[in-house]
Image (tube, rainbow, N blue to C red):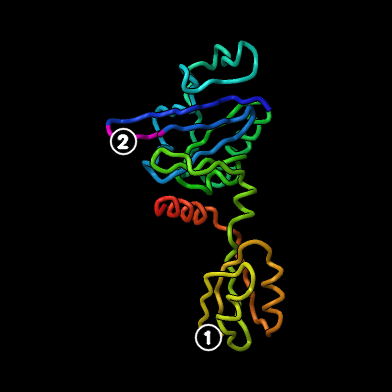
């Protein structure tokens, strides 16, 4: 697939603050690309440099005219993700994004709320203090994110037994109620709790917001 935008060593600063710090990135034609970080992390900018190819910092690829955008599109402001939309308008907006992407347009979406990007973005870039932490597909993020599980047993089950199950972590047992996270396959956990009488079982879908926060904090600690 053609590359619509490529940045190499892209840096943008406001005084002593670097909004972007040596950013290397490729965005494909027809891709809905989200970039996310806490407010002030470099992802929100009144004039996002990755949205307007210019000079030598970012070079569009593919298409007629050596990648130059059509005359009517040059200098057009990037589309922004509306906030505070009611569910019906938000769904309509998401459908419109899918339509323009299907026509070959490249869409860039900036947000500090990952759930706003989850349903429409093909890939998401995570940015911290202007630096790129990761670029990942939404499907891959969901696959690596942990599930939150809560189990009520007929009789208490020891935390040690649950902690020994492959993929299970953050075990918190209070009486007959056990809460924990599961990374990867759920099968080992299901087989382990099946040795006991289970009263209730709930499993929460991976929370991409928390996954991002965890990675952000890991990068901060590093």
Q: Which mark is residue 17?
A: 2
Give the mark nearer the N terminus: 2 vs 1: 2
Categorize mark 2 by other alpha carbons within 10 Å: few (<14), some (14-19), many (20+). Answer: few
Instruction: Describe residue 14's horizontal placement relative to residue 135 as left or right.
Output: left
Q: Residue at x 53, y 74 (%)?
A: 171
The stretch of residues the image draws in magenta is 16-21
- Mark 2 touching mark 1, by CB under 8 A? no
Mark 2 or mark 1, whichever is nearer to me: 2
Q: Is residue 20 magenta?
A: yes
Toward the viewer: 49 or 81?
Answer: 49
Residue 181 in the image: x percent, y percent? Answer: 57, 67
Q: Which residue is mark 1?
A: 175
Element marked by disc 1:
loop
Query: Which mark is drawn over residue 91?
Result: none
**How much space separates mark 2 and mark 1, taking CA atoms?**
50 Å
* Horizontal relation, residue 170 to residue 221: left or right: right
The residue lying at 68 percent from left, 30 percent from top is: 102
Considering every residue shown, the one lying at the far front of the view is: 222
Please tell me which residue is depicted at 38% across the width and 43% down the height of the picture. Answer: 39
Using a 10 Å C-alpha cutoff, classify the residue at mark 1 as few (fewer than 14 neighbours), some (14 to 19) or many (20 or more): few
Taking the magenta stretch, the answer to whether it contains residue 83 is no
């Amino acid at each position: 697939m053609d590359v619509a935008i490529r940045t190499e060593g892209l840096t943008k600063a406001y005084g002593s603050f670097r909004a972007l710090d040596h950013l290397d990135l490729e965005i494909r034609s027809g891709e809905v690309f989200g970039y996310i970080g806490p407010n002030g992390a470099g992802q929100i900018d009144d004039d996002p440099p990755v949205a307007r190819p210019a000079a030598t910092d970012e070079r569009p690829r593919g298409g007629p005219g050596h990648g130059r955008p059509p005359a009517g599109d040059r200098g057009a402001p990037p589309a922004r993700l509306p906030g505070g939309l009611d569910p019906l308008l938000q769904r309509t907006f998401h459908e419109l994004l899918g339509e323009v992407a299907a026509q070959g347009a490249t869409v860039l979406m900036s947000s500090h709320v990952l759930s706003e990007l989850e349903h429409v973005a093909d890939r998401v870039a995570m940015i911290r203090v202007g630096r790129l932490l990761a670029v990942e597909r939404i499907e891959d993020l969901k696959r690596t994110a942990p599930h939150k599980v809560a189990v009520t047993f007929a009789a208490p089950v020891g935390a040690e037994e649950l902690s020994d199950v492959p993929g299970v972590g953050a075990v918190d047992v209070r009486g007959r109620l056990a809460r924990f996270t599961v990374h990867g396959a759920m099968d080992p956990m299901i087989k382990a709790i099946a040795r006991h009488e289970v009263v209730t079982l709930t499993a929460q879908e991976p929370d991409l917001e928390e996954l991002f926060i965890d990675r952000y904090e890991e990068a901060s600690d590093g």
